[in-house]
């Protein structure tokens, strides 16, 4: 690893391990120009490395442009993006969340033509046509069995949608966006209905503002996100798609944890393994958006 890093930057000291998980390993690399960041995607999340390189080619002003990528090993070397949005804004500033969500919706619209390219890079396919294959990968829990017929109907709704399939970050919040608006950390991403991004985003927002998930404040953020899509369908139709996509995104979260833990040892499975079935249990809960 260090030999590869040293081929691309002039290191001025030892690397500092920032995170080590079954799904990723991140180190901070000192250089004379400031820190850079090495990330190794693990498990079945290695697609993030080629994805970040592709995103930088398609939308260079809205994502980090990597210094180097080794797609086969899931390695990426990234410049420092500066402070994250959470660190430079008042946690009670609703406006920065509204702007972040509207900008992300536009990013998804701009990326939609590249959906087949992203799947070809190995980004997980969560589009409606892949529903059956994805469900077959999941454990057959009581919650999944009880909700399956409804999930099939919701998937049919999304299959008929005028909203194009695109990149779904699946962990979008003010801790994964830099102050300048660039988005990072695509290790949970998939290609599917873009509105699924609201599952995690709305929950984090409710937590930040200390309100219930269906609070008018959270619905205001939902509406800010929907504005860039408003030319594609009626408000009623878009809201129906939000509820369908967010419910189906719970399957996506379970699949994401499966990918993250594919190479986990016993201790890793003990610590995080319940997330796979935990997200399926969430299927019993109604969507409040």
Image (cartoon, rainbow, N blue to C red):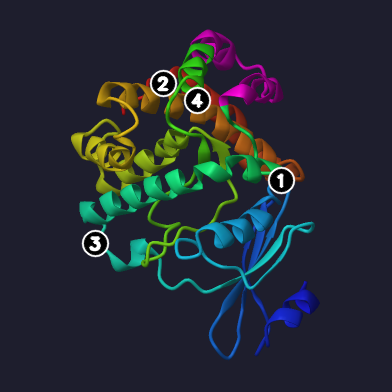
Mark pair 4, 2: CA separation: 12 Å
Mark pair 3, 2: CA separation: 31 Å
SS at mark 4? helix
Task: Work out whether residue 188 can be spotted.
Answer: yes
Q: Which residue is mark 3?
A: 90
Closer to us: 289 or 190? 190
| The disc label shown at residue 117, or none | none
Could you tell which of marks 4 and 2 lies nearer the N-terminus?
4
Point out residue 163 in the picture as x, y percentages from the top left corner: 43, 31
Q: Which residue is mark 2?
A: 285
Mark pair 1, 3: CA separation: 37 Å
Of circles 1 and 3, which is in front? Answer: 3
Q: Which residue is mark 1?
A: 267
SS at mark 2? loop
Point out residue 280 in the picture as x, y percentages from the top left corner: 55, 24
**In this picture, residue 30 sits left or right of residue 172:** right
**In the image, is residue 131 part of the stretch drawn in magenta?**
yes
């Amino acid at each position: 690893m260090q030999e590869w890093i040293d081929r691309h930057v002039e290191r001025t000291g030892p690397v500092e391990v920032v995170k080590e998980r079954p799904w990723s390993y991140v180190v901070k690399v000192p250089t004379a120009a400031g820190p850079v960041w090495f990330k190794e995607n693990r498990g079945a999340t290695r697609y993030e490395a080629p994805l970040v390189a592709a995103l930088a080619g398609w939308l260079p002003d809205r994502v980090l442009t990597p210094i180097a990528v080794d797609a086969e090993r899931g390695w990426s070397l990234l410049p420092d993006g500066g402070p994250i949005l959470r660190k430079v804004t008042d946690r009670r500033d609703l406006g920065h969340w509204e702007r972040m969500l509207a900008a992300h919706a536009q990013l998804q619209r701009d990326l939609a033509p590249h959906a087949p390219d992203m799947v070809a890079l190995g980004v997980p396919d969560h589009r409606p046509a892949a529903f059956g294959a994805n469900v077959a990968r999941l454990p057959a829990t009581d919650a999944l069995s009880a909700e399956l017929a409804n999930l099939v109907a919701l998937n049919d709704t999304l299959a008929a949608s005028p909203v194009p399939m695109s990149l779904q970050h699946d962990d979008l919040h003010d801790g994964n966006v830099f102050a300048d608006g660039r988005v990072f950390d695509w290790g949970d991403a998939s290609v599917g209905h873009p509105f699924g991004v609201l599952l995690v985003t709305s929950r984090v927002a409710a937590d930040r503002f200390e309100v219930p998930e269906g609070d008018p404040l959270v619905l205001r953020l939902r509406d800010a996100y929907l504005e860039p899509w408003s030319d594609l369908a009626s408000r009623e139709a878009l809201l129906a798609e939000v509820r369908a996509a967010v419910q189906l995104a719970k399957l996506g979260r379970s699949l994401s944890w499966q990918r993250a833990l594919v190479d986990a040892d016993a201790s890793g499975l003990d610590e995080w393994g319940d997330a796979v079935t935990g997200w399926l249990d969430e299927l019993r809960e109604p969507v409040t958006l």
